[in-house]
Amino acid sequence: MQVTASAPGKTILFGEHAVVYGKPAIAVAINRKANVKIQKRADSKIFVEIPGLKLSGYLELEKEVIKIEKDQGNIGILNYILKSLKKAQIEGETESENGMEITVDLEMPISGGLGSSAAVTVATLTAALTHHKLENDHQIKISDQDLERDKIASYAHQIEMEVQGAASPIDTTLSTYGGSIYLSADANKIIRMPLDWDLPLIIGFTPRQMNTGELIEYVKIKKDRYPAVINSILDSMEQITETAREALLLKDEKILGELMNINQGLLDALGVNTPELSNMIYKARKAGALGSKITGAGGGGSIIAYCPQNRDEVLLKLAKKHTAFPVQLCGEGVQVKLSPKERFT
Ligand code: PMV
């Protein structure tokens, strides 16, 4: 018997960095997922493998110890998995001697501003909670409708806070529920935006030199040094997000594209752009994207190119030198599947 949970990543359309200072932001779930498969083991060990990252190791939940077998520098992601398994074990009231074999398949690059850690956390929590329910009662059948999404979203956010020290609820909310959200100016109110279109985007990715925390700190130093200058940039970002919210609801392609380009100029002014990101952004625009900008913290990582037309041209142009792939809005949040087949509901 095995359980597989799949949770989407995300992209921030407008408002990154400004959201740290109480400004609004808009983000959407994307159809690139983290898929976490859990199988019972005969012994009491917990073995995790992420073949795409050439990473594997054993986890000891009680002592919170990670014993690496194979690693190519991405060990950090195992902390999210460990905390998720521990939370699910406590919640599921399962014996600690129940061993598990866990395989993680990632459809997106990690540390690229695409919410991979939240997607892995939400999928691991969901798979493990389901696994424990089935361990306790072999007869029950579980479907997506049975998922306690509010609980999963809240646990996942707690885990991101524990591992990272700080995290907005954007990523974990989108991985859990899917769709699109507007994070209000007080940053605590998440409003779901009913978008009934796919929002065609191309992602361009480059490895990051700095992590999100360091980039936030970098902007903070600038803000402390030039408060009036940086505050007016953040105010402009707020206006962009508010205008974009209306444009998204009205499906106004031209305004959306223009606002992305203006937002990019301001992110550049904050100092989170890099020559490589800039290069991808201008290539995308030249190939026909209506708008393109950094998505997430910047300093490397990802860009989005908004392409209601010329999608193939933009993809081809970016993919020549960079990692690039098309994405669209993902309406569904975390999903769970049970196998063997007779357990499907
Ligand atoms: O690159 P990411 O996905 O970590 O996005 C960071 C976005 C910030 O606004 C800089 C921080 C945040 O928590 O919203």
Image (cartoon, helix red, strand yellow):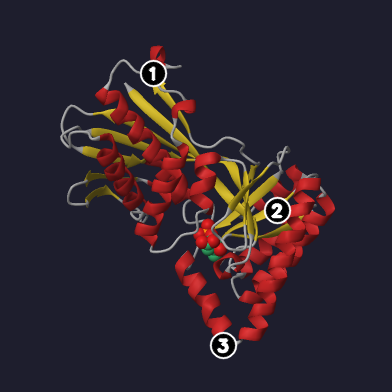
Labels 2 & 1 near each other (Cβ < 8 A): no
Q: Residue furthest top?
A: 342
Separation of marks 2 and 1 at Cα, in angstroms: 42 Å
The image quadrant of residue 273 is bottom right
**Residue drawn at the location 37% of the way across and 27% of the way down:** 3
Q: Is residue 162 visible?
A: yes
Disc assigned to residue 141: 1
The image quadrant of residue 233 is bottom right
Residue 323, how many percent across, how many down?
58, 51
Labels 3 & 2 near each other (Cβ < 8 A): no
**Residue drawn at the location 39% of the way across and 18% of the way down:** 141
User: Residue under circle 2?
Assistant: 305
Residue 68, how many percent across, how many down?
24, 50
Disc 2 marks which amino acid?
A: Ala
Q: How many marks?
A: 3
User: Residue under circle 3?
Assistant: 225
Q: Residues within 10 Å of mark 3 (few under 14, many from 20)?
A: few
**Residue 328 to residue 272: above or below:** above
**Mark 2: secondary structure:** strand
Q: Nearer the viewer, residue 236 or 198?
A: 236
The CB of the residue at mark 3 lies under 8 Å from ligand 1: no
Separation of marks 3 and 2 at Cα, in angstroms: 32 Å
